[in-house]
Amino acid sequence: QVYLVESGGGLVQAGGSLRLSCAASGRTFSSYVMGWFRQAPGKEREFVVNISWRGGNTHYADSVKGRFTISRDNAKNTVYLQMNSLKPEDTAIYYCAARITNYSGSLYVQSGDYAYWGQGTQVTVSS
């Protein structure tokens, strides 16, 4: 079992920055994939970025490339999402997610690829 807790959300002006954190506990090991998704009201849950726990390989959605950066601290079992140049369309609840297997050839960009989810943290970007 994996437990995930997000923090760091808040209200920010367009063009500003936030850093989200996701602390993982329980069953964690090197083959995990950690991801960030977001969901705006009335919209489908949307892939943002993910990272392989062992190798640190990353994959970003086109909408956030060049603005968001994912990183990890393996010793602390924590993943971070640095969000810069925020836009009103980034407003959503941001969720941390994890899967316990990582097969070569898959990028894991669907919510169904992940079995474990945090409660989410609200990010609101005002214009």
Image (cartoon, grey):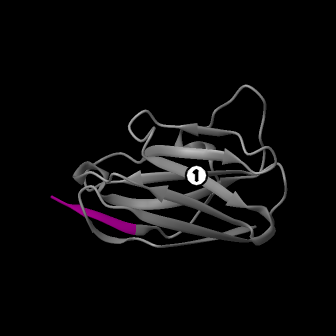
Q: Residue at x 54, y 45 (%)?
A: 49
Residue hosting label 1: 70
Pointer 1 local density, CA inside 10 Å: few below 14, some 14–19, many at least 20: many
* Residue at the image point whose x is 47% and y is 49% from the top: 68
Residue at the extreme right: 30
Which residue occupies the foreground of this view, 79 or 120? 79
Q: How many marks?
A: 1
Location of the C terminus (image quadrant)? bottom left
- Residue 87 magenta: no
From the viewer's perspective, tell me whether residue 47 is left or right of residue 16: right
Image: 90 above or below 18: above
Q: Secondary structure at mark 1?
A: strand
Query: Where is residue 60 drawn, in percent x and y?
Result: 52, 38
Residue at 42 percent across and 42 percent down: it is: 64
Residue 109 is at least partly visible in this image = no
The secondary structure making up most of the magenta span is strand
In the figure, is residue 42 to the left or right of 20?
A: left
Amino acid type of the residue that numbered disc 1 sits on in the rendered structure:
Ile
Identify the image quadrant of residue 117. bottom right
Question: In which image quadrant can residue 66 be found?
Answer: top left
Q: Which residues are magenta?
A: 122-127
Percent of width and height locating residue 53? 76, 51
- Which quadrant holds the N terminus? bottom right
Residue 23 placement (x, y as % from top left): 65, 71
Residue sitting nearer the eye, 101 or 51: 51
Q: Nearer the viewer, residue 22 or 86?
A: 86
Q: Position of residue 44 (x, y in %)?
A: 36, 45
Q: Is residue 88 visible?
A: yes
In this rendering, the answer to whether 67 lies above or below 84 is above
Locate residue 72 relative to residue 92 in the image: left or right.
right
The residue most toward the left is: 127
